[in-house]
């Protein structure tokens, strides 16, 4: 009756799309509506106001674009830059690579700062480039906050400090796809000019909304940016914002109601509690990996990601086989190693609407799979390590009676 | 927005109501329909035919009654017995107790065979009673196949053997509420006269359908049974079965579509595979309990239940506190100890649409709770024991591409 | 993919089960939950309090029973009466007939007051019987508020007046299945002792809840009532009400959340507005019937029902053919004529969550069907008559922005 | 509990987003899934194959892009044309205007052929332009098959004839947003090079999929087209089609399952039956408009649209008031007049999953609203006219038992 089926719940541990909370599924279980009626604009107004909170901005202008993260990238770039503009961009994994590819295809002059996969953005080189750029040829720093392919979180506060130190006016464009609403992110405090995420990540919705937030400086830049854009043009939105009808083209009614429910849940739990929960999940996962005697793809603690862990497997194991087994035997979805780390890592996504017992089920499953593929894991060891930490750190659920 | 809320999925491990599969939720997500249209009878016909398969009967007549297990009990009794009739009934836990209470209130002459809670029905005493009952005053043997309060499975094959051995014509009425569709159950082979279950148990639907199946002998008995009954009267159903409209009063459209979907899923997995999965879940749970150094409320292996495990806690721990913590800190629902075993046992339900990784998440959670309440559990020990068994025994999922 | 399918929405105009509002469908789209957790009792408490409002009682005690209307009848009777008790009961159509049949099978001494189908309860005869009953042999008056088979509403205020006039202590038991929450119903004011309805009627939920409300006098009667009952016994509920856990057996989690949502919608619209809407629907339907040149099965205006209209067809037409055509050609579900009026009437149910344009679509459909089966209807005539009335009477929707 | 609420169903008669069938809502009521598992590509393969059928193409290559119609336009243009390329484009209403605006902003040299709003594309002028264009400076003809703002359907067969007659190699790019899957559309027969639609139109899904189909000639053109594009680039899709993983970026899992269900329903009804149903709906609506004594915005019968009817109101009425009343009093959503026809027309969308009785309810509602706003309509007249036609033309529903 369904396309494929296995008994029980699918254990979804890819780093996106992630598990949707039941209240959000309920909110989206509805017929279409006329988006030009008074109801949709009234709701949209609350969404635009509330979505700023997850960016921690009061001065930013959000755009809810019917697209994916790739489209959100394009929106960030084409509204703020002109062909030929120099960007500094950090290649540290598959998603930063794809964004750089996009920047190149959009005809920017991309100054690529490459690191080994598993390392964070090389900010020393950024410092050098900023120091050397007296004539301000660098128009934008493009950085992925959390590289989903390797589980590396970059230090945005340092990026801002460097820009300030060198009094450099470059725009700071941040891919927050697998960070915003899960990791500590501060748009205003860190002077981020464009930040973006996708609905299917920490917001725990279906795919379909690229959420982009622009600082006043970015909006100003959009007035002179010469990149060709229509579908992704912020001006069309701004025009309709003024009219109070908000939508230059048909939005997904279901995703709007879903976003409303998702934000309500996040605020009910508390954004800081949501972030603390992700911190716990990341820590617990890493403790399990260590207990298994495996290495984290991320080379230093400062870069550890609390939304996704890329686990290195020994050379005699194909990590793709682990992902395949997870799906065919345990009804679990893990993340593949991509590109340079294909076959070498598998990834555990631990972002979005998830709790600790779900993660522990996943970790137990990974242990069995490791055994399946011939790795001499001590069964229960990872779960034991994670439990020892979690048992001391999980708070009571605040919204329970 | 919801009545209560905790992040992530609720871990539902009470022995009913159990987890509903997503395809079943989808099937039930619908408006009402006219149950007198040609569509509902056409579907009902397939349901009545297919539901017999989960009872393993070809000669039985099933009734889908808009009620709960308690109502299904009443249907079984009042259609086959007359006030004053002698029944032999086994008191081994809270649910057999409640059924006996019902039998008494319905004015039967209940011959109660009591065992210590944690033991199975005393079939030696049954043998004695049958041997002594030359005049066939015993009209029915009423037995709970699986006592949900203590996790005890009774041996129905032996009951049948005894009846056959003594050539006793008593009806065999079986409460299969927490067994049918999860444990090995054979209505025809074991000569069960009335078997019953509820939709919210192994069928993994919402509460609302009492499913009763009557042997030809039971149907015959219903012709002379003098117990007063209207709502639960089989004759009203039989009248409408003949008409081909099937329903003496309004059924729940949603539950009918849900039952259709539930049966489809069970047959897709294979009923024997479903039962084998329950066997695995039961075994894995007991291995964990053993690893924790705790005792099973069930006193002998022959009675171990594969749908629910009642775990005895040390005297210095209140098992209700475990259930409370599970809910307030871990978003998990465990079963309370009821009546005589209140405070002494907590119960892990492992029936219905569930897979191994879900159970392992539950077991990891129980370990943390045990630590929370001061029991010196070795974290990870239960999960390790369960994994060691499961890793060797879980089959590939057959319906995957 | 579905059991049967026709393009567009099914037009559901049977007098139950009725259309479920989308917000209620959403509320019910959920997994099972542990009904023994703190959440379900907390919600149940609000339900029991709020459900009294639709009965217009402050002193009644409500019971939410997992059953249908037939079971609710049985609950009302067996908890208040003893075998052999004399009831006065009015036979005016199929549902009052079935209730009388139940009363007889439950061994009451039923004093049947029969009227022609299409007429209301003969209250003159009731007056005579009360006047003659000096020794108070009549233990209960059993009356259907709205006979769904013929579209006849009885005058309960008059029944109360008669009882008061003759100072007769008989209980007043009312079937409000197709009236409560749609027609003017006043439990306390009219001194109703037991009132009952089903979830699939004006409450616009799926089938599955029999909602019974007992006056203090009825509760008192239950203490001495000798009818055998277990599943329907109020005492089991009262015991759990005191404990604050509320449920003697497993409720349908989905129906509880659905009832919460249904009550919220009713109170948001306003119970009196809901009733006024039904008044409009009834009136509009009758105007259409008149414009078609057809007769209402209900013989006098004082009995006209605002929840269902039974339309008499000319002798040369089989009303069953109308219902069949509605379904096969227009994706519409109309009510059949039942028993004595089979083939002679078809029924338009206009109760529950429904608005005027839905009804007008139905009326237009009926016109086409009448033409299909050879009745010389003037197409558009019924709709014109209904519109002329509605256009002057529909209020603005209060809950719109 | 919901954002706004009115009793009963909302009557959704805007020309998009349209009513979603219940089976499609059910199919989409699901958690996210890993789109890199074997299941999603296996399903995607069937979608890409089946979606070609609604375009009536065997040689085209479809793209399912997470975007809206505006994005689908951009995909069609940027993949086939280079900046400066001359397009011939017809301005006949708001949506053709917006497409032309996009073409201009994408730096094409747009040769605009303007007609009065209410008329179709001026194909005589096209003929002249083609005749004069010996050097083939025209690179593409861009034409909206059905202009949603005015209810005008253009004759694509004639466009193809003209191109053939003048042996002109220009690409034929067709906006089929409010036509494909509802009106007669033949991609291969008419030599359409790019055709596109959106999921929220005749496919009756939520917004979120731009469905674009490219002829072999269009694919060839994409190899040399120099328009900058990344998110909308067909090459990224084609690369993943070859890999068999299909998705260059995360699709909406829910929309894929929804599309599968939508296509299944369409094929079950039969695409030709679906189109015939739209023909009936259009005809019935126009008969009602005529009966009301109002004019169709569409000036000639040859351009009448079977998916949307724009109704001209007398000068003393503001059509926006009609739309507002529909929503606030009748829970109905009608289409506003846009831009040049604002205040002058209101629109009845009659596309997608809709049946005749739904339309008749809408027409009855419009009659009451016309009366509300002071137009001397004869109530029932439009419904009568529509019924007279429909009663002779509606077929039996084929998929009923």
Image (tube, coloured by chain):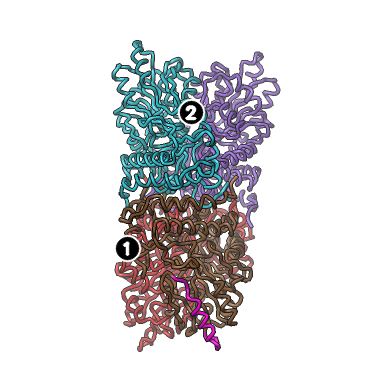
Chain colours: A red, B purple, C cyan, D brown
Residue D123 vertical placement versus C109 (above, below): below
Name the one closer to the observer, C323 or A334.
C323
Name the one closer to the observer, B32 or B388.
B32
Write down the quadrant of residue B127 in the picture. top right
Magenta range: D119-137
Q: Quadrant of the C terminus of chain A?
A: top left
Q: The disc numbered 1 marks a residue on which chain? A: A
Write down the quadrant of residue B36 in the picture. top right
Mark linked to residue D285: none
Label 2: element kind = helix
CA separation in Å, label 1 and label 2: 58 Å
Q: Could you tell me how many numbered marks the image carries?
A: 2
Q: Is residue B295 visible?
A: no
Residue at position x 30%, y 29% from top?
C188
Label 1: element kind = helix
The residue to which callout 1 is attached is A49
B318 in magenta? no
Mark linked to residue C94: 2
Q: Residue B216: x, y in percent? A: 66, 27
């Amino acid at each position: 009756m369904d396309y494929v089926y296995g008994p029980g719940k699918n254990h979804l541990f890819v780093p996106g799309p992630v598990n949707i909370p039941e209240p959000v599924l309920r909110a989206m279980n509805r017929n279409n509506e006329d988006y030009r009626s008074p109801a949709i604009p009234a709701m949209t107004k609350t969404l635009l106001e509330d979505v700023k909170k997850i960016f921690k901005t009061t001065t930013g202008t959000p755009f809810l674009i019917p697209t994916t993260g790739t489209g959100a990238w394009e929106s960030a770039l084409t509204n703020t830059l002109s062909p030929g503009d120099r960007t500094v961009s950090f290649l540290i994994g598959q998603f930063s690579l794809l964004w750089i590819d996009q920047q190149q295809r959009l005809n920017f002059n991309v100054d690529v700062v490459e690191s080994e996969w598993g390392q964070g953005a090389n900010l020393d080189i950024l410092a050098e480039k900023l120091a050397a750029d007296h004539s301000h040829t660098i128009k934008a720093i493009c950085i992925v906050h959390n590289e989903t392919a390797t589980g590396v979180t970059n230090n945005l506060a340092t990026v801002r400090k460097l820009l300030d130190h060198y009094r450099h006016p470059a725009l700071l464009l941040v891919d927050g796809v697998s960070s915003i609403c899960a990791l500590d992110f501060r748009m205003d405090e860190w002077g981020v000019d464009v930040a973006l995420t996708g609905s299917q990540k920490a917001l725990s919705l279906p795919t379909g909304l690229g959420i982009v937030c622009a600082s006043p400086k970015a909006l100003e830049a959009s007035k002179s940016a010469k990149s060709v854009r229509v579908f992704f043009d912020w001006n069309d939105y701004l025009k309709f914002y003024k009219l109070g009808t908000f939508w230059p083209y048909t939005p997904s009614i279901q995703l709007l109601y879903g976003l409303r429910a998702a934000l309500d849940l996040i605020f009910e739990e508390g954004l800081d509690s949501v972030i603390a929960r992700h911190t716990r999940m990341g820590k617990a996962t890493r403790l399990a990996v260590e207990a298994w005697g495996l290495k984290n793809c991320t080379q230093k603690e400062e870069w550890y990601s609390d939304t996704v862990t890329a686990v290195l497997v020994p050379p005699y194991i194909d990590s793709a086989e682990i992902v395949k087994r997870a799906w065919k035997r345990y009804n679990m979805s893990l993340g593949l190693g991509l590109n340079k780390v294909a076959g070498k890592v598998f990834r555990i996504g631990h972002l979005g609407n998830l709790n600790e017992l779900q993660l522990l089920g996943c970790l137990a499953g990974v242990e069995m799979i490791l055994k399946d593929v011939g790795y001499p894991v001590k069964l229960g060891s990872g779960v034991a390590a994670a439990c020892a930490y979690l048992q001391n750190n999980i708070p009571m659920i605040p919204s329970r009676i």
